Amino acid sequence: MGSSFADNVARLGKPNLTQEKDGKKSVMYLTEENYLLVFSTRPDTDKISTIQYSAYDSSMESLSLDLSSLLGLSATEDELKSLYTIKDKSSSKGETMYALEEGFEILVDENNLVKQLIISTNSVFNIHGIRASDSLDKANKVFGEPISTSAGVQDTTQYSYNYNGGAFPTTVVLSVDSGNMIGYIQVNVTEE
């Protein structure tokens, strides 16, 4: 506490998430042990004022990192740019897929409504509390029993779920390896 924010970021390397709002800076690091290291400043200073280190699942931040709240909302490209860093985008048939530097992808339709989210890395973000690298058992506790399974690529199994616990009914697809660890999460707003 009280040390330089910039010096600590330089020492620890690129954070998983950087935020700045109303002059207050905050960074988040996800450790290999699935802990979050968060430190932040007071407005308009470079001195660290708070440090938090907690297990991801029990952290206060994990709720705010749930991307499922984006499903069904309007998201223009400018709005996405104001929140995230766009690495790449591709468009087809009125839909646009954005690959974001923060470790996830988002698909919007011709009306700019978010229709799909994909987390394919060990991102700091989650979908309904589930992250890539979580266990299949944890996902089954959240989503229930899968409605179907199928063989995936490179010795993985695809598990599909209908989930109604969010703002919109969704279809969730998980790619799970032979050790029952999730490598990929895709969630789509279910067409009515």
Image (spheres, rainbow, N blue to C red):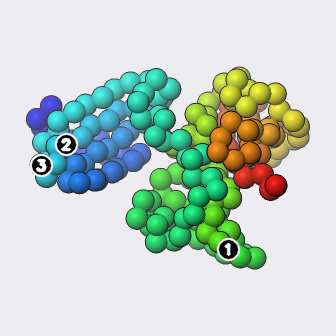
Residue of label 3: 45
Residues marked 2 and 3 touching at CB (< 8 Å): yes
Between 161 and 176, the residue placed more toward the observer is: 161
Circle 1: element type: loop
* 4 on left or right of 183: left
**Dot 3: what SS?**
loop
Name the residue at 20% across, 54% down. 23
Do residues under tags 1 and 2 come within 8 Å of each other at their CB atoms?
Answer: no
Q: Counting other residues with Cα less than 10 Å from the Cα at mark 3, is it few (<14), some (14-19), or many (20 or more)? A: some
Q: Which residue is mark 2?
A: 41
Instruction: Please name the amino acid that badge 1 sits on.
Output: Glu
Element marked by disc 2: strand
- Give the x, y percent position of residue 149: 87, 37
The three-letter code of the residue at mark 3 reads Thr
Measured as percent of width and height from the top left, residue 33 is found at 47, 26
Tell me if I can see residue 180 in this picture.
no
Give the Cα separation between the discs numbered 2 and 3. Answer: 6 Å
**Mark 1 closeness class: few <14, some 14–19, many ≥20 residues within 10 Å:** few
Q: Are marks 3 and 1 in contact (CB under 8 Å)?
A: no
Q: Nearer the viewer, residue 113 or 29?
A: 113
| Quadrant housing residue 134 | top right
Separation of marks 3 and 1 at Cα, in angstroms: 42 Å
Q: Residue at position x 64%, y 56% from top? A: 72
The label nearer to you, 3 versus 1, is 1
Residue at horizontal 88 percent and vertical 37 percent from the top = 148
